[in-house]
Image (cartoon, rainbow, N blue to C red):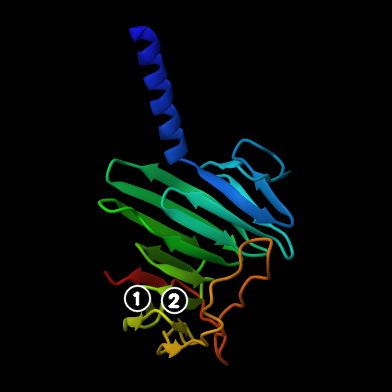
Amino acid sequence: MKRTLCVFLLLAGAALCAFAQSGVISEFSGTVELKTAKSASFVPAKTGDVVAADTIVSTGFRSTAVIKVGSTTIAVRPLTRLSLAEIRAESDSETLKVDLQAGRVRVDVKPPAGTRANTSVQSPSATASVRGTDFEFDAYNLKVYEGTVVLRGNDDNMEIPVPAGASSYVDGYGRAADPVETNRHALTPPAPVGTGSPGKTPSSGALPPAAGAINVTIVE
């Protein structure tokens, strides 16, 4: 009996560890495909599919997906490709690094009390670091739903705080623009996947976005 109990506890612990180091497709709409690190091709995704580290997630036209990893929820917009570069869970912290190759995501991080969640979204031209907030980011444009985000352009050392209900962007000269209040309708959270169209990308103004690194950090 004791041996059976020990085996059960070991299996349960292993399952919890595996879950903590993977994401899960909680819902999707349209064409969503997965390509694992050991696979040579993409396969159609299903609800409940595990998204391990280095698995590439790709959404098609008018297609969306929701990935849950610990206390982080990632809403993947149409025509987006990303992978979970690093997933690590410890007793008092969670670390998640997302490699955004193309497209747009909305990230919602709500760690439980006593736990610290360190989530970052990296693209070829920007990095957004998240801790306990809710915002939408496409590497150049920033729209904040909850919390305060600091935006800094690659050619300017000035940091611009962007509060909830506002948006900002990096202009063609690599400078972060002063935040402006975003239309309240635009800030309404998108409808659940499969029940409506995703929100619009925030406008980046008349100037094209600048190339290079853009830093986004959270004011605690």
Q: Nearer the viewer, residue 25 or 194?
A: 194
Report the front residue among 106 and 113.
113
Q: Is residue 8 depicted above or below 132 in this figure?
A: above
Q: Separation of disc 1 and disc 2 at Cα?
A: 7 Å
Q: How many marks?
A: 2
Image point (46%, 68%), residue name: 126
Q: Residues within 10 Å of mark 2 (few under 14, many from 20)?
A: many
Is 19 left or right of 79, judged from the image as shown?
left
Up the image or down, 83 lies above or below 36; here it is: below
Question: Which residue is depicted at the point 42% across and 33% down?
Answer: 16
Residue type indicated by callout 2? Val
Going by the picture, which residue comes out furthest to the front?
1
Q: Position of residue 122 (x, y in %)?
A: 47, 61
Quadrant of the image containing the N terminus: top left
Quarter holding residue 196: bottom right
Residue where numbered disc 2 is placed: 144
The image's mark for residue 148 is: 1
User: Residue 63's x, y, as percent?
Assistant: 70, 61
Whether 142 is drawn above or below 51: the answer is below
- For label 1, the crowd category at 10 Å Cα-Cα, with few meaning under 14, some 14 to 19 and many 20 or more, is many
Please tell me in which quadrant of the rendered image residue 209 appears: bottom right
Residue 170 on image: x %, y %: 47, 82
> Helix, strand, or loop for circle 1?
loop
